[in-house]
Image (cartoon, rainbow, N blue to C red):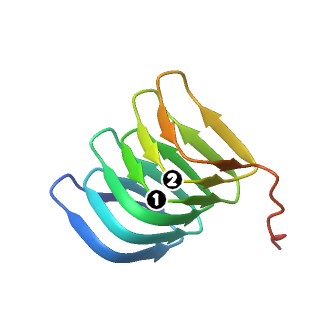
Amino acid sequence: MADCTIGSGITINGRLSGDEDVTVEGRIEGTVALESHLQVADDGTVVAEIDVDSITVDGTLDGDIVARDTVRLSEGCQVTGNIRAPRINIEEGARFKGNIDMDVEMPATD
């Protein structure tokens, strides 16, 4: 499985889906549904509803997050929206506004 990078000069409007790891250095607006990891880089901006296996936010994210594994909010990130995941790591210096639901039963995977 390869990684995909959305470069700093790229803006995506609509739905992004797939099963590869994705790093966002540019901007995504819409919805993101991945069966893998999403990385929002320092200069990346995501304004979308997120449904992923796991996510790391170093940049800016505005939208609700549903993760089947882990959500990691890094120092200096800015996140506005609700988070639903069994494991959440919020580093000191991360900015977060929203609600967290960790009492989550995710569907079993084969």
Number of residues whose C-alpha sits closer than 10 Å to that of mark 2, classed few (under 14), some (14–19) or many (20 or more): some
Q: To which quarter of the image does residue 7 belong?
A: bottom left
Task: Give SS at disc 1.
Answer: loop
The front one of 96 and 54 is: 96
Q: Is residue 95 above or below residue 47?
A: above
Q: Residue at x 27, y 42 (%)?
A: 43
Q: Is residue 10 above or below residue 42?
A: below
The front one of 25 and 78 is: 78
Label 1 vs label 2: CA separation? Answer: 5 Å
Residue 6 as seen in the image, left or right of residue 93: left
Q: Residue at x 41, y 65 (%)?
A: 48
The front one of 90 and 33 is: 90
In the image, residue 91 lies at what x, y percent? Answer: 55, 26
Disc 2 residue type? Gly
Mark nearer the N terminus (1 vs 2): 1
Answer whether labels 1 and 2 touch (C-beta < 8 Å): yes
Q: Which residue is most to the left?
A: 9
Residue 43 as seen in the image, left or right of residue 99: left
Q: Is residue 106 above or below residue 82?
A: below
Q: Is residue 37 above or below residue 56?
A: below
**Residue carrying label 1:** 63
Task: Give SS at disc 2.
Answer: loop
In the image, residue 101 lies at what x, y percent? Answer: 72, 51
Q: Which residue is most to the front?
A: 98
* Quadrant (top left/top right/bottom left/bottom right) for the C terminus: bottom right
Rendered image: mark on residue 81: 2
Total numbered labels: 2
Q: Residue at x 28, y 74 (%)?
A: 13
Disc 1 residue type? Gly
